[in-house]
Amino acid sequence: MIPLSLTKTEIHEAISHCQEVAISFGKSTKKVKRALIPKTLRTELSKNIGSKCPTCDRIITISNPPSVKQYQPIASSFTVEHLFPLAIGGDNTYTHLMVAMCHHCNARRNIVMQQYIGSRRRTPKALEDVKKFVEWSITSVLLPDYEQDTRIQEIWEATESLKLEKSKRDKKKTKPPTLAELLERISVLEGRLEQLENTKWRRLTRFITGLLKRKPRITQYSADEMLLECIRSGGTTPVKLGQKITNYQKNHDWEETGKSAFNEHFGFAKQQTYTTTISDILGDRVKVTGIRNNARYSIIVSGSEAPSVVSLQKTPPITKPNPSSAPKVNPSKEHSEKPKIKITPEEFSKGLLSQKKRVQPVFFSTLYERLINENPIFNLKQYGIKPNDYLTEKCSDLLTIIEKPDGNTPPTIHYWITDPQ
Ligand SMILES: [Zn+2]
């Protein structure tokens, strides 16, 4: 079914050429070229609909069931596969290296690539892996009898039973997979992996588990929340903030950590400093003093500047809770000066939820800051009350509060809020 008529020599020449291009691409900072596949080529390749996929036994079917308007490919759906993938320097001019392939194999090959070579690195070992991958990518389709690199081939085989989401590209209309579905997918894969040698598969299992987990993570944290959380927990200088962010990334299963991983993840310029990012996106909430390595970040609370190191350590509960919603008053001083609390836990909880702009849990302090910016009556400081205490002691029946230790020793507990269940 292969639409190409390259000789063995031409295939090997193509491999060498693509390896060279991929290596110089890997060393460069060039962007991946994404472009629609030219219609004529697509039409030409679609003649393979009804033939066998080059890498499995499926008969390739049309790209989308006719009854479905959205793109919802099934395993056998027609796709165009770049044997010289765009992600490593290929483009649509390599028409002799573009083939018809079933959706399932195409997706598996993407996973193999991500697993085997990961994100762009420039070490000699990484570049050697890119070369091996190019060789595998081309020969696995065009030279079925070629002796393949064992490790890549094993990754390929391990992904065989990986069930793909029906429609990755139709996120809005498709419900996210349930936990049961995810677990089932993982167990199917694990069963397959167990038959194989364990150590080789640890990385792959982690990677695939990471893939399944990644979607919630991406939607769960925004750059501003992450920066605020890290500044609040002690990241008050560029160096300290860098450490806090790296810890945060490690605790949230980022594959790469550090500033460039942060920038890449949120779409900032690769070398952009945290100070610049903070000034850009948190200018109204974080005050920056000093420059470069001497910069200091402090969080602005309701117009006044609050100390940026705010202990989020869980404080011991009040020993004698007052039956009314009376505030916890700082007993040491100013007892008589603190005004009586003017809000109820219900109003406070409702206020927090009104600041929540998405379904996922949100960091409590983010909601609290938004709330007191909107209405200072909710600023608990004026009543001598610690926000975390008020939240955990008065509002636990009104909100769902999630406790997240930050991974430090001793751990600092962060509170996240979501709607009552
Ligand atoms: Zn296939």
Image (cartoon, helix red, strand yellow):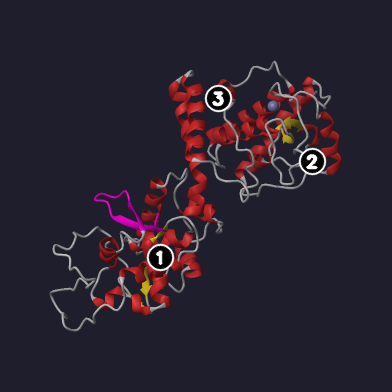
**Which of the two discs, 1 and 2, sits closer to the camera?**
1
**Front-lying residue, 294 or 89:** 89
Identify the mark nearer the N-term, 1 or 3. 3
Give how far apart the Cα atoms at labels 1 and 2 are: 48 Å
Q: Are marks 1 and 3 in contact (CB under 8 Å)?
A: no
Identify the mark nearer the N-term, 3 or 2. 2
Residue type of the residue flagged with mark 1? Thr
**186 lies above or below 282:** above
SS for dot 3: helix
- Residue at 40%, 68% in the rendered image: 350
**Which of the two discs, 1 and 3, sits closer to the camera?**
1
Q: Which mark is residue 93?
A: 2
- Residue at 37%, 65% in the rendered image: 365
In the picture, measured across the screen, residue 153 lies left or right of residue 106, that is: left
- Residue at 52%, 46% in the rendered image: 215
Q: Residue furthest front?
A: 323
Percent position (x, y) of residue 106?
A: 67, 33
Quarter of the view holding residue 392: bottom left
Establish whether ligand 1 lies closer than 8 Å to the Cβ of label 1. no
Q: Which residues, given as a range, are shown in magenta?
A: 400-421
Residue bearing mark 1: 366
Residue type of the residue flagged with mark 2? Thr
Q: Residues within 10 Å of mark 1 (few under 14, many from 20)?
A: some
Percent position (x, y) of residue 152?
A: 58, 25
SS for dot 1: helix
Q: Which mark is residue 158?
A: 3
Which quadrant of the picture is home to ligand 1? top right
**Front-lying residue, 303 or 272:** 303
Is 409 colored magenta in this rendering?
Answer: yes
Q: Are marks 3 and 2 in contact (CB under 8 Å)?
A: no
